[in-house]
Image (cartoon, rainbow, N blue to C red):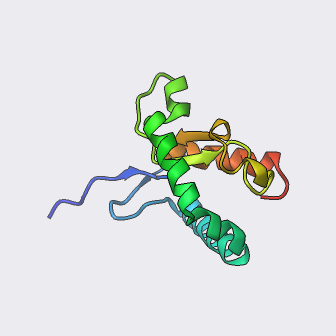
Amino acid sequence: MPSRSKKPCAHPGCPELIEAGNTYCEDHRKKESRIRNKRYDDQQRNPKIKKFYSSARWQKVRRKKIKQDPLCEHCLQEGITKPADLVDHIVPIKVDWSLRLRLDNLQSLCCSCHAKKTEKDKQKYDCL
């Protein structure tokens, strides 16, 4: 039986080819696991943030933003048309809670652009 073809690692910018059935290369598998665990831990430690993301007000604003900008705004700047997967806070809510529901602090992003933006935010803001 022929083996399945390899595919690129899902980590943004990683050129490593991996076996089908895996998501990340060996280098990024542990890192991505730590990121997911940290995100889960952050939500568990900060019930205010968890409550916010499940609130009707956030869901309404999020729907409005996705309807207004259904394509990834970062990809569009590069001339790429890609649907947005989520709505991101330009200034993170941990940095300025008062901007959490303002449309001018939101951007529609695809998952890969969101991951890159989150990494930049971690370097820019010490509290993330």
Q: Taking 25 as reference, is 12 above or below it?
A: above
Q: What's the residue at 68%, 40% (across, down)?
A: 105
Is 14 on the left-hand or right-hand side of 119? Answer: left
Instruction: List x then y, in percent, for residue 72.
Output: 49, 36
Task: Looking at the picture, tell me which residue is in the foreground, 109 or 115.
Answer: 109
Q: Residue furthest right?
A: 126
Task: Looking at the picture, tell me which residue is in the foreground, 26 or 61.
Answer: 61
Instruction: List x then y, in percent, for residue 127.
Output: 83, 58
Q: Is residue 87 visible?
A: yes
- Residue 48 sits in which quadrant? bottom right
Q: What's the residue at 47%, 48% (across, down)?
A: 63
Q: Taking 107 as reference, is 52 above or below it?
A: below
Q: Residue furthest top?
A: 79
Quarter of the figure that contains the N terminus: bottom left
Instruction: List x then y, in percent, for residue 80.
Output: 44, 27
Instruction: List x then y, in percent, for residue 98.
Output: 77, 51
